[in-house]
Structures are given as structure tokens and as C-alpha cells.
Amino acid sequence: MQYAVLCYNEESVTEAWSRDENDRVMRDLAAVEKKYAEAGRLGPVARLMPTTAATTVRKSAGESFVIDGPFAETKEQFLGFFIVEADTLEGAIAFAKELAVANPGTGAYEIRPLRLFKPGGGPK
Amino acid sequence: MSELAWIDLALTAARPQAMGALLRYFRDLDLAEEAFQEACLRALKTWPAKGPPRDPAAWLILVGRNSGIDRVRRRARERPLPPEEVLSDLGDAEDDLAERLDGAHYRDDILRLLFVCCHPDLPATQQIALALRIVSGLSVKQIARAFLVSEAAMEQRITRAKAKVAAAGIPFETPDAAARAERLSVVAAMVYLVFNEGYSAGTAAAADAPFATEAIRLSRLLLKLFPAEPEIMGLTALTLIQHSRLAARFDADGQIVLLDDQDRTLWDRALIDEALVLIDKAMRHRAPGPFQVQAAIAALHARAATPGETDWAGIERLYRTLERLQPSPVVTLNRAVAVWRLEGAEAALALVEPLGERLSGYFHFHGLRGGLLKELGRREEARAAFDRAIALARTPAEAAHIRQHLDGLQRERAEAD
């Protein structure tokens, strides 16, 4: 089974990271990614720009309209995701827990099994 | 990341919202600050064992509010006449606490917190110091170091600024749309001052200049509160692009490296990309303003992979727009740099000379004028201009940069002789 592991945290926290803290978190996460990638179990990984960079296209009966900002105003923001292959839910939970050890503190990982996965050809 | 580190981050992140709410409850900056400090101490004690609360800001507001009320009551007992209206106010606050914590107020809370730091009677440096102390939570020591004054002097400055704010009265009515827009533009200008203070006094060591990163944090916060304001998009984009060059702006000896000589691979692409997105978003609103135009100018520099690819014509056009939106001799001076590249030193000098009266105390005026005169072979006048510039330099790096020009003139003269 493939799972999306969705990262939620308060942006105000991740934006308060110093450059060193940011680099350290990215390095520690990369170590976990490497392990799963070498086992052939890691799909695409993405980190999103802050929600202030987001634009939302709202569907409507007539022409869709465009709104500045993210779709939902939430306490914690959707900041990125990992796609991982795991035999069971326990495996996906174990992956998320490893991420949490690499990047402790506030926030959460939401595990969502994939229903459809199109890896796509690009962009690289 | 250690336990202490993430708690510290969570407290820093929650600070503007929590301080904003506590200021609304207590209507007093000192009391709000003490209450917040108290809440932070409790957080340090309880969070390690229990983990972070789901909503750190709400937690800090509740705990801070309770400790603040205790403090007010204790003070009331120590005084012969209890401030009855303060206490009854707090009673009311309790009743609709749930409603107040749901975030409906928090936008105006944070805006108010920033706005009180911008009191027009406060000189710019005090506005900056106050905002960094109250909103960002930088220590007095950090702020003092950046302003090159003693901690005691900075402490005194901040205390005086707070007293002035308190005496002026803090605006507690919920602003209407026009008042909100007015507050937002005043606050945006202050955030830009914070950024500039860091930028011009900046050194390669970001730790010595946390102002720039704090200003970026504040402008992103404003954008989160006002996601559809193109000028706030512009402000954020501008600070991001300027900051993206930090690693390239100084060499190993701390000397200034000019834009043309910077190693562009050291520019932080992630910050530039984010800024370009924000400029794209702002453009859709078709409501240009000074911050957007300045961001667009910075973006034209950022988009050029080499100095030779810089779109100077575009930059000159944008400075013309800026002159119209926000006429200022400094803007014209900047346009002159673009004119120098497009039409040469003669044309640029013609634009620069009439500014002398208003910019006689401005380092960059004399620096640019010296550079133009030097290129035109008017060495003695160039030397005089560079001498003026050195006298006006605000940092050793600025002075050292001008000294290089003077040394260059010296060499030219020696070769000529």
C-alpha cells in the first residue's frame, strides 16, 4: 500500500527557525528519507512555500473565482508531504514516527492511504 | 532539536497573538508583558512533561490572563483604593472568553500591538526597538547590540517609549475598515524600517543582525492576517529579495561586495522564488503601490543571472513610477544609477546634482556622486565627494568601501604623474 504522509505544523513556528535550525531539520529528515529511498520505498517528497504564497481557485457555477491565500484557515498549516510504500498501516506509522524523531516539537503527520498514484514524468 | 529549543520556538511563534490578546485584556503594555513572561515560565515547567498544547497561543493567553489578574488583585490589595473598573472589566472578559479565543479578534489584536509601537511621537529608532522588544520578543541586549548602545541605555529608551505610548492612550476600539487600512499602512512602514535597520547595519553574521529576519517574520505575519493586500505582498517580497543576498553582500573580511561583484550563486533562491510568487499575486490586483514597485525593481535584479543581463531600462521605468507614487530625492538618486547604466555618467550626474541641497547629509548621495565624477575624470571633485561620504558612513564597511575608491584615485594620480 502507498501512503501519503502529510505534514502539518504552525507556520509561525517553522518560520521562526533560524537558518541553522532549518538546515539541521532538513538534514535529519534527509537521513530518514535516505533509508526509505534505499529500500525503494520512498516516492516524491515535497516542501511547500508558506501559505502566504498560496492562491485558491474556488469552483463555482459560473466562472471560478480566485482568492489569495490557502483554501482553509487552520491553526496548523499543510506544509509538505512524503509518499511512502509500506506493507501495513503500522509501517506507515513507523515512518511518520521516525520523521517526528528527526523533527520533534509541535505539529502532526497525517497518514492518508493513496487511492490513485500517477508519478508523472516531470518536473524533475 | 532539543526540548528547550522547540519550546522556545513555540513561545516565539505564539508571542504576537498572545501579547496582542493580553494587551487587550489588561490595556497596559507592562502588565501584558509580565503576564506573558509568567505564562512562558509555566510553559517551560509543564510542556516538557505533557508535550506542547494543541494551541500554544490559546494556552499562553489563558495562563497569562490568570496570572495577570492575580497580579492586578494583589496590587489592588496593596493600594488603598482598588481600581474597580479594571477588575470589572476583567469579569466581563471572562464571560465571553470562549468567543474571544476563537480567533475572531486576533487579527485586530496583533495589528493593535504593532500599531502602538508606531506612535508618531516616537522617533523611528524607538519604534523599531519597541516593536522588536514587545512583538518579536528580542532581548534588550540583542537590540542594544544592533544599535551599538549599552544595554542600560537601550533599556531606558524602551522604558521611555513605553511610557509615551501609555500616556498617549492605547486605541482599544475595534477599527472600522478605513482605520484598519490606515493602521496597516503605518505598521507596514514600521516593519520596513526594522528591515532597513538590519539591512544597512547588516553583517554577514545573521546572528548579529536579527532585524532583517524579524522584519520578514513580521511582514509574513501581516500577510497572513491580510492575505489579499497587494502592498503587504510587495513588502514581504521586497524584504525577501533583499535578504536573499545576505551571504553575497560581504566578503570574508566583512567588506561590502557591490551588486555587480556579488557571487550570485550565493543568493538564496528559495527566498527569491517566494518573492516572485508574491509579486505575481500582487500584480493580479492591479493596485500598484510603493512596496510593490520596489519589490519589482529588486526582482529585476534577482532575475538577472549575470550583471550584464540586468534589465536597466525596466528598472529605470519602475523608478519613474516610484517617483510618481512617492516622490523623494532618494528615489531619484536610485533612478540616476539606472540612468548611469543606460545613458552614461554625464546624464546621471545631471540628475544627481540638483539633489545636493536635500541630500547633503546622505552617505549614498556623495558616494554615487563621487563615482560619477571619477568616471568623468573629474578627480579632485570626486575626492571631495568621497571625503564627504566617508564622514557620513554609518558602518566600518561603508567607510572601507569609499576608502577603496579614494585609494583608486590616489593610484590613478600616481600613474598620471
Image: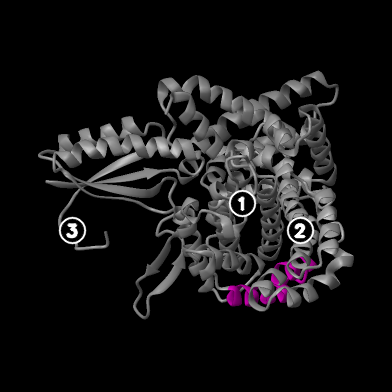
Depicted B152 relative to depicted B171: above or below: above
Dot 3, how many residues are within 10 Å of its Cα: few (below 14), some (14-19), or many (20+)? few
Badge 3 vs badge 2, beta-carbon distance below 8 Å: no
Determine if marks 3 and 1 fall on one subunit.
no
Q: Residue at x 11, y 38 (%)?
A: A88
Secondary structure of residue under mark 2: helix
Residue B121 position within the rendered picture, expressed as x and y whole percent measured from the top left: 85, 50
* C-alpha gap between disc 2 and disc 1: 15 Å
Tell which residue pokes out farthest to the right in this image.
B357
Q: Quadrant location of residue B87?
A: top right
- Residue B54: x and y in percent read 42, 36
Q: Which mark is residue B257?
A: 1
**Closest to the observer: B275 or B70?**
B275
Q: Which residue is mark 2?
A: B364
Quarter holding the N terminus of chain B is: top left
Residue wearing tag 3: A119
For numbered disc 1, what is the local secondary structure?
loop
Quadrant holding the C terminus of chain B: bottom right
Residue B316 lies, in percent from the top left, at: 64, 75
Q: Residue at x 56, y 59 (%)?
A: B226
On the image, which quarter does residue B48 sit in?
top left
Tell me which amino acid carries mark 3. Pro
Same chain under badges 2 and 1? The reply is: yes
Observer-side mark, 3 or 2, equals 2
Instruction: Specify whether residue B162 is painted magenta.
Output: no
Residue segment shown in magenta: B312-335
